[in-house]
Image (tube, rainbow, N blue to C red):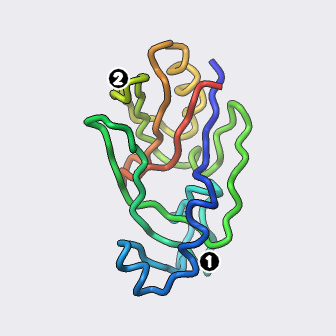
């Protein structure tokens, strides 16, 4: 079954870069300069930030549904990031090179299955997952740090 991986919208974060470090701290966010790569994956561009780039580390509600699985976690967003346009059945490099925790949800936002997948096999895992009509969407997390990376939907 075809799938579509979705980046987070750039406009949701653009204004945060104009805030002072003190104002960011009040929102539990931090401005950082990347010192090594890979390791700072942007959830808007779906690329690893380069050494010297400015990013924000902030808490993001990736599962806002009224469900026991409602959740937030830390994410990185690159300054000036352009929202990734991911083709149907495409798995961006930033996901292919990581160990991914694949979490499958039904239309009631209940987790109905989960697995850990080598990013190189993520495309086939998503395709197989969406063969099941009870799977409404998937969340992709970086398995080691546990943070949300992207969502995927049936295309």
Element on which disc 2 rests: strand
In the shown orientation, is residue 7 left or right of residue 19?
right
Image spot of residue 49 (x, y percent): 60, 67
Nearest to the eye among marks 1 and 2: give it: 2
User: What residue is at 69 percent from the left and 51 percent from the top?
Assistant: 84
Q: What residue did someone put label 2 on?
A: 112
In the shown orientation, is residue 151 left or right of residue 5?
left
User: Within 10 angstroms of label 1, few (less than 14), some, or many (20 or more) residues?
Assistant: some
Asked whether the beta carbons under mark 1 and mark 2 sit within 8 Å of each other, the answer is no
Image spot of residue 69 (x, y percent): 30, 38
Image spot of residue 150 (x, y percent): 52, 45
Between residue 44 and residue 143, name the one nearer to us. 44
In the shown orientation, is residue 91 left or right of residue 126?
right
The picture quadrant where one finds residue 28 is bottom left
Residue 63 marker: none
Q: What residue did someone put label 1 on?
A: 53
> Above or below — where is 5 with respect to 142?
above
**Dividing the image into 4 quarters, which one contains the C terminus?**
top right
> Above or below — where is 29 with respect to 115?
below
């Amino acid at each position: 079954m075809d799938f579509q991986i979705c980046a987070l919208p750039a406009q949701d974060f653009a204004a945060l870069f104009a805030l002072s470090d003190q104002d960011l701290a009040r929102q539990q966010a931090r401005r950082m300069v990347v010192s090594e790569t890979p390791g700072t994956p942007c959830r808007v561009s779906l690329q690893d930030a380069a050494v010297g780039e400015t990013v924000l580390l902030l808490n993001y509600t990736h599962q806002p549904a009224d469900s026991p699985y409602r959740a937030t976690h830390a994410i990185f967003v690159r300054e000036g990031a352009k929202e990734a346009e991911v083709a149907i059945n495409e798995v961006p490099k930033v996901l292919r090179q990581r160990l991914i925790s694949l979490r499958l949800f039904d239309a009631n936002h209940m987790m109905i299955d989960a697995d850990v997948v080598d990013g190189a096999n993520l495309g086939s895992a998503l395709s197989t997952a969406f063969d099941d009509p009870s799977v409404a969407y998937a969340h992709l997390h970086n398995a080691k740090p546990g943070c949300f990376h992207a969502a995927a939907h049936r295309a």
